[in-house]
Amino acid sequence: MPSRETLSLIRALVGFDTTSRDSNMALIGFVRDYLTRHGVDSLLVPNPEGTKANLYATVGPTDQPGILLSGHTDVVPVDGQDWTSDPFHVVERNDRLYGRGTADMKSFIALALAFVPKFLERGLQTPIHLAFSFEEEIGCIGVRRLIDKLKHMPVKPAMCIVGEPTGMQVVLAHKGKRSYIGRVRGLEAHSSLVPHGVNAVEYAAELIAHMKAMARRLAREGPFDPEFDVPYTTIHTGVIVGGTALNIVPKECRFDFEIRHLPKHDPAPLFALIQAYARETLEAEMHKVSPAAGIVLEEINEIPGLDTRAEEDVVAFVKGLAGRNDHAKVAFGTEAGLFQKRAGIPTVICGPGSIEQAHKPDEFIALDQIDRGEAFMTRLMERVCRA
């Protein structure tokens, strides 16, 4: 059974509604005050508006590199989801804790905080660094400001563990992601005079169908990495909006799409192929009716993939903490690639809970996963503290 301290902190953290669109400052203030009570100073790295903040703290010696435990404080919305209990009030039933963020990923943050007084009581020879971010769920936005600070610190962590839910399995790679907006500008006309107009919705659909054909080809031909749960690069359209009325040839259409790529598969040539089809095939046809018609494709966000070699020290170290020898690669993105690529910190992912429960109504974490998380932290304490 998990400790009272860990369970209490999970309940407290879930009780803060930190949906990405809203502020996380109440939670950050709670964590800062908790650390202050244990004699640990915190550095807050806010957004420009001061409505959200990252928190960074070092537990133990501040003059040497240590182990970074990283997690995001924001959660996805509950709008429109059919919950059987209040999503921001933890409910325990059937050996599970239900609540938004229990799996993704406030339980890991609670575990790290619960062990702070234990680390301090034992006496740390190697420091534990804590990094808690904002706006991970909308593109790993907030942590970038913290990483910019980390890069210039005189002492930065020797390695990083991102506690996303992996069932306490060590994950050493995840896909990268590039997100785009497509905007199609057509020419309005009465629907009885379709040839006199340029249908923005239909041209958007043609480009989306072309990308779907590319996605099918990637699924057939690769490149492949069989260690991933989805072993090839994917292309996906998630949003399309256009048109005003059935009897009007639509002037505008917008669609959002993404490329989730294997870490070693450069997505730039794929995007170039999409652009070439838009310009050379679709726009060429559109311009026969209206030279002002066109298609604009814009990259709006990029999350680098994580690609840690199995031979790196961080992998063996965290496998020892997890008490298992296997590892995995996953399709979902995390902040781990940013710590590795932008901060130069060797990084893996390992945390309690299942990604299968994330973002769903009645999100939960099993109590035995929290038990495993506490065992993980206990082994970490044995490695970084005095005998």
Image (spheres, rainbow, N blue to C red):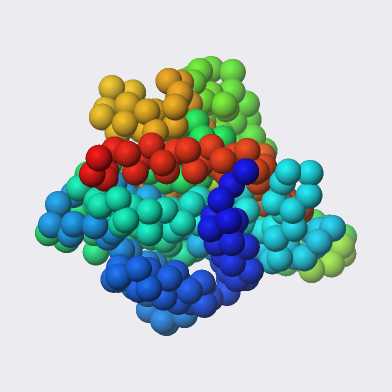
Q: How many marks?
A: 0
Q: Does residue 22 lie above or below 190 as drawn?
A: below
Q: Position of residue 303 (x, y in %)?
A: 42, 48
For residue 337, side relative to residue 221 (left or right): left
Residue 140 position within the rendered picture, expressed as x and y whole percent measured from the top left: 45, 56
Q: Is residue 290 visible?
A: no
Along the line of sight, the residue nearer the viewer: 236 or 352: 352
The residue that appears at 63% across and 30% down in the rendered structure is: 213
How far across and down, in percent of the image, does residue 179 sit? 50, 51
Q: Position of residue 89 (x, y in %)?
A: 71, 65
Residue at left offset 50%, top offset 31%: 169
**In what quadrant of the picture does the C terminus appear?**
top left
Q: Is residue 113 above or below residue 348?
A: below
Instruction: Report the residue at 46% width, 56% height from top.
Output: 114
Residue 24 lies left or right of residue 151; in this view the side is: right
- The answer to whether residue 77 is above or below residue 214 is below
In this picture, residue 334 sits left or right of residue 241: left
Write the residue at 32% across / 26% down.
316
316 sits left or right of 241 in the view: left
Nearer to us in this view, 278 or 359:
359
